[in-house]
Amino acid sequence: MTAIKSVAVFCGASLGAIPAFQAAAVALGQGLARNGQRLVYGGGGIGLMGVVASAVLAAGGDAIGVIPDFLRKREVAHPELITLEVTDSMHSRKLRMFDLADVFVSIPGGLGTLDETIEILTWKQLGLHDKPIMICDVAGSAQPLLHAIDATVEMGFAKPDVRALFETYDGVAALLERLGSATS
């Protein structure tokens, strides 16, 4: 087991409807920097993506953005990143983030965040990796996803052991505590 050095964070390109989402992104970014863990994320300078990256950088931490070329303008690549990798597609973005990360964290976001979270869970279910996956429930934001996963079990499309593919944390403080003691 090795210490967690790089944390991929899946989160929204929007700020969301309540201030708690932005506060969580700030706390996560500051905590990653405090832990000496590098942020790996989608490279955007907007929404929760921009907030978490800015918080990491403001606290003296390291962040690597990975953004597909077609999204550089739409998501406005973060201007303060020292390392911004540009990929040719969303698929290559996800693969590169996977390669760079020791652990995956999902905080509030939209369809893209759900897509990234479900895909990394699926890869783990298929045995393509054994990296930790952590879902941070901020103000109930993770409940619909958790209910959807439970529904796949209840309807017979997934086995109950899919719940062991990920860990769920109520808020950023508990997540950061786990990340501080986590190994991959």
Image: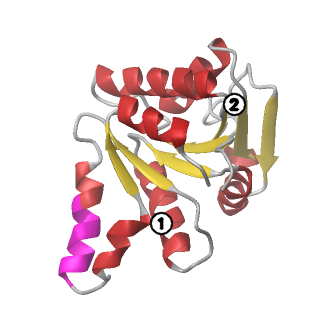
Q: Kindly report the distance in space between the C-alpha atoms of the residues bearing marks 1 and 2.
A: 26 Å
In screen coordinates, is 44 left or right of 132?
right
Residue at x-position 60% and y-position 28%: 35
Earlier-in-chain disc, 1 versus 2 = 2
Residue at x-position 23% and y-position 69%: 150
Question: What label does residue 121 carry, if any?
Answer: 1
Residue at x-position 69% and y-position 41%: 5
Indicate yes or no whether the magenta region holds residue 58. no
The amino acid at mark 1 is Leu
Residue, disc 2: 77
Span of residues in magenta: 147-155
Indicate yes or no whether the magenta region holds residue 154. yes
Q: Quadrant of residue 57?
A: top right
Between residues 154 and 17, which one lies in front from this camera angle? 154
Label 1 residue SS: helix
| Magenta part, dominant SS | helix
The amino acid at mark 2 is Ala
* Residue, far top: 58
